[in-house]
Amino acid sequence: MITRDLICVACPRGCPIKVTMNDSGEITEVTGNTCKRGDEYARAEVTHPERSLTSTVKVIGGSAYVVSVKSSTAIPKELLFDAMKEVNAASITAPVHIGDVVIKNLLGTGADIVATNEIK
């Protein structure tokens, strides 16, 4: 048996959750959660963790040098370093509007990198 202890981030409660798996990695039990979201979070976190990506991208010819960006959906955690290489290499020409797509389909994940601020 393998166990993983997590703190749930699905809601503000921060429940301590214990996930038990058999030797082949199959989840056999989730305990400690006080809501259904905690169970879903724990199962996803131990089998396929994902994270939202937030950063900045260079702006060419704008009133600021960078614009804040985020991923349109969560991406697999194991791709974060490669994703940041793509984001760091990207740039966008001013003007920039909230929702402008800076990188389409980041690393084939289906997630776009979008601007979250306005730059004139």
Image (cartoon, rainbow, N blue to C red):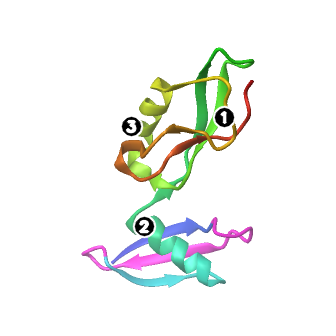
Secondary structure type for disc 1: strand
For badge 2, the amino acid type reads Val
Report the mark closest to the observer, 1 or 3: 1
Q: Mark 1 points at which residue?
A: 68
Q: How crowded is mark 3: few (under 14 residues within 10 Å), some or many (20 or more)?
A: few
Q: In this view, does 48 lie above or below 118?
A: below
Q: Mark 3 points at which residue?
A: 82
Secondary structure type for disc 3: helix
Indicate left or right for 21 with 11 as reference: left
Secondary structure type for disc 2: helix
- Residue 76 lies in the magenta-colored region: no
Residues tagged 2 and 3 counted as in contact (Cβ below 8 A): no
Indicate left or right for 78 with 73 as reference: left
Instruction: Return the residue nearer the eye: 27 or 91.
Output: 91
Instruction: Return the residue nearer the eye: 1 or 114.
Output: 114
Structural distance between the alpha carbons of marks 1 and 3 = 18 Å
Q: Residues within 10 Å of mark 2 (few under 14, many from 20)?
A: some
Residue at x-position 66% and y-position 34% = 68
Quadrant where the C terminus sits is top right
Could you say which disc has been placed on residue 46 in the image?
2
Q: Position of residue 6 (x, y in %)?
A: 55, 67
The residue range painted magenta reads: 9-25
Q: Where is residue 115 in the image (x, y as percent from the top left)?
A: 63, 38
